[in-house]
Image (cartoon, rainbow, N blue to C red):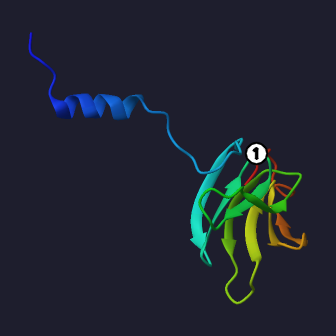
Amino acid sequence: MTEPTETAEAMDSAQRQAPASPWRERLELGEGARWVDGRLVLVDILSGRLLADGWTGRALETLVELDVPLGAVAPIEGAPNTWIAAAGTGVCILTETGGISWICDVAASSPIPMRV
């Protein structure tokens, strides 16, 4: 029987450590993390929230909260704090002040159930 090497022991130890997160919050289905204007922005799809954090260890801030799932989100160039988003069964414009302007509901004209 051979003795484990120092490298193998270190790798084994690293694999046993729990993953670290700078946030305390738990997300239902967090995705789409990206850097926007110096802060990390992401969506929690199932809860309908657009979240941001610019500093490690700080709580995630809810920028926008919808009552429908929130999918792909992208900032609109030249319009600070304004986003185009796939939400629920349509596409909308969101602002961090809570404004929601629906552009279209793609499922409304579809003969089969769908979401975006």
Q: Residue furthest bottom?
A: 78
Task: Give the percent coordinates (x, y) of residue 16.
Answer: 41, 28
Q: How many residues crowd mark 1 within 10 Å: few (<14), some (14–19), many (20+)?
A: some
Q: Is residue 113 above or below residue 86?
A: above
Task: Give the percent coordinates (x, y) of residue 52.
Answer: 69, 63
Q: Is residue 110 above or below residue 37?
A: above
Q: Residue furthest top?
A: 1
Location of the C terminus by quadrant is bottom right
Q: In percent of the image, x 71 and y 51: which residue is there? A: 44
Q: Residue furthest left?
A: 2
**How many numbered marks have been drawn onto this rendered protein structure?**
1
Q: Amino acid at mark 1?
A: Leu
Q: Nearer the viewer, residue 68 or 112?
A: 68
Q: In percent of the image, x 82 and y 49: which residue is there? A: 111
Location of the N terminus by quadrant is top left
User: What residue is pinned by disc 1?
Assistant: 46
Q: Secondary structure at mark 1?
A: loop
Q: In percent of the image, x 70 and y 80: which residue is there? A: 76
Q: Nearer the viewer, residue 20 or 76?
A: 20
Task: Give the percent coordinates (x, y) of residue 33.
Answer: 59, 60
